[in-house]
Image (cartoon, helix red, strand yellow):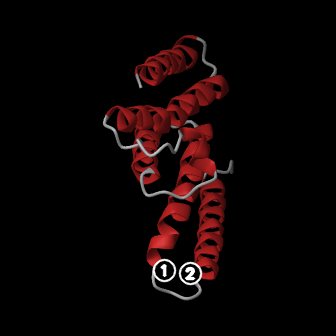
Amino acid sequence: MRSALAYAGAGIWLTEYLLNQSRLPIPAGITAAFVVCLTPLAVYGLQTALGWWDDGLVFQAFSSRIDSRWLLMELATLACGAVMLWRYRLPFLVLPVAVTLWYVSMDLAPFLFINADRAGELSEQVLLWFGLLILLLAFLVDLRHAPK
């Protein structure tokens, strides 16, 4: 956890430097996104220190297994992404936020259909429509900010 926080601090410093001293918004967006992407690792470190992961499931399973404990990581990542977007307004920061929203939809969908006979099929439908909604929102934001 301390390593993730140290890297995040370095990433924020580098983002500030690239924006204010060098006037390089694209590399600054990449370093700011790096900070957002470190958030789940920092939360996992905190959860491990608290003993929440004593069952042997490791962070590398984040992409392949659905588990309710991931939800805290995802919510923290969304909060960090919102703060970073509010502070920096860099377009590349939307990428980790969108990916995190997709993970949230994956982890919440099974809880919506616990007793349903077709829970797997309904979860797929939720993910499909959620993905289409995110694409529509991205398109609308792109239209709104397109040069005139």
- Viewer-closest of 32 and 41: 41
27 lies left or right of 83: right
- At x 60% / y 30%, what residue is drawn? 29
Q: Position of residue 113 (x, y in %)?
A: 48, 80
Q: Quadrant of residue 91?
A: top right
Q: Which residue is mark 1?
A: 113
Question: Quadrant location of the N terminus?
Answer: top left
Mark 1: amino acid:
Phe
Q: Is the residue under label 1 in contact with that under label 2 (CB below 8 Å)?
A: yes
Q: Earlier in the sequence, mark 2 or mark 1?
A: 1
User: Is 82 rendered above or below residue 3?
Assistant: below
Q: Which residue is mark 2?
A: 119
How would you rate the neighbour count of disc 2 (Cα within 10 Å): few for under 14, some for 14-19, many for 20 or more? some
Q: Position of residue 97 (x, y in %)?
A: 54, 47
- Viewer-closest of 17 and 146: 17
User: Is 110 rendered above or below residue 63?
Assistant: below
- At x 58% / y 43%, what residue is drawn? 96
* Residue reaching furthest to the top: 21
Secondary element under disc 2, as helix, strand or loop, is helix
Q: Position of residue 68 (x, y in %)?
A: 43, 58
